[in-house]
């Protein structure tokens, strides 16, 4: 009877869900969210600045340039964060460690 109940609920007999599984899932979701925010915030900020400057200066190219600059800055943020998560250090951290 327990075997049938386990199949219906999707669990095997005698196996309980580990709390560590949920923790790993939440950490992964947080990391993905951080990657997204680290990429989108510089792009949106620089694009908004570009639109504002284009309107003020009556130009039409600053939005594109500042969008590209925001994309590069966002990519650099994501790269630095990924290196930190993989155990590598940023160049800024190495320089400060060498100076101390």
Image: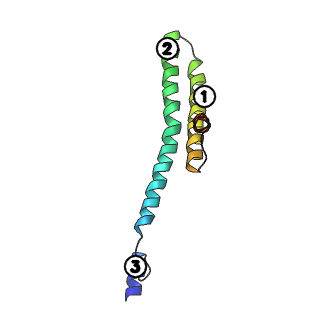
Residue for point 56% across, 13% down: 59
Residue for point 48% across, 24% down: 48
User: Mark 3 or mark 2, which is nearer the start of the sequence?
Assistant: 3
- The CA distance from mark 3 to mark 1 is 52 Å
Element class at badge 3: helix
Q: Could you say which disc has been placed on residue 68 in the image?
A: 1
Element class at badge 1: helix
Q: Residues within 10 Å of mark 3 (few under 14, many from 20)?
A: few
The residue to which callout 2 is attached is 55
- The CA distance from mark 2 to mark 1 is 18 Å
Q: Position of residue 67 (x, y in %)?
A: 57, 27
Point out the residue furthest to the front here.
Answer: 100
Reply above or below: 33 against 48: below
Name the quarter where the C terminus is drawn: top right
The residue to which callout 3 is attached is 8
Reply above or below: 58 against 41: above
Viewer-side residue, 73 vs 88? 88
In terms of image quadrants, where is residue 7?
bottom left
Q: Residues within 10 Å of mark 2 (few under 14, many from 20)?
A: few
User: Mark 1 or mark 2, which is nearer the start of the sequence?
Assistant: 2
- The CA distance from mark 2 to mark 3 is 62 Å
| Left or right, 5 with reference to 74 | left
């Amino acid at each position: 009877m327990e075997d049938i109940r386990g199949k219906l609920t999707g669990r095997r007999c005698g196996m309980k869900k580990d709390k560590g599984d949920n923790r790993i899932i939440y950490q992964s979701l947080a990391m993905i969210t951080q990657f997204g925010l680290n990429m989108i915030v510089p792009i949106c900020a620089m694009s908004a600045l570009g639109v504002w400057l284009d309107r003020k200066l009556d130009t039409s190219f600053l939005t594109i340039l500042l969008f590209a600059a925001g994309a590069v800055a966002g990519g650099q943020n994501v790269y630095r964060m990924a290196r930190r998560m993989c155990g590598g250090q940023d160049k800024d951290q190495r320089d400060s460690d060498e100076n101390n």
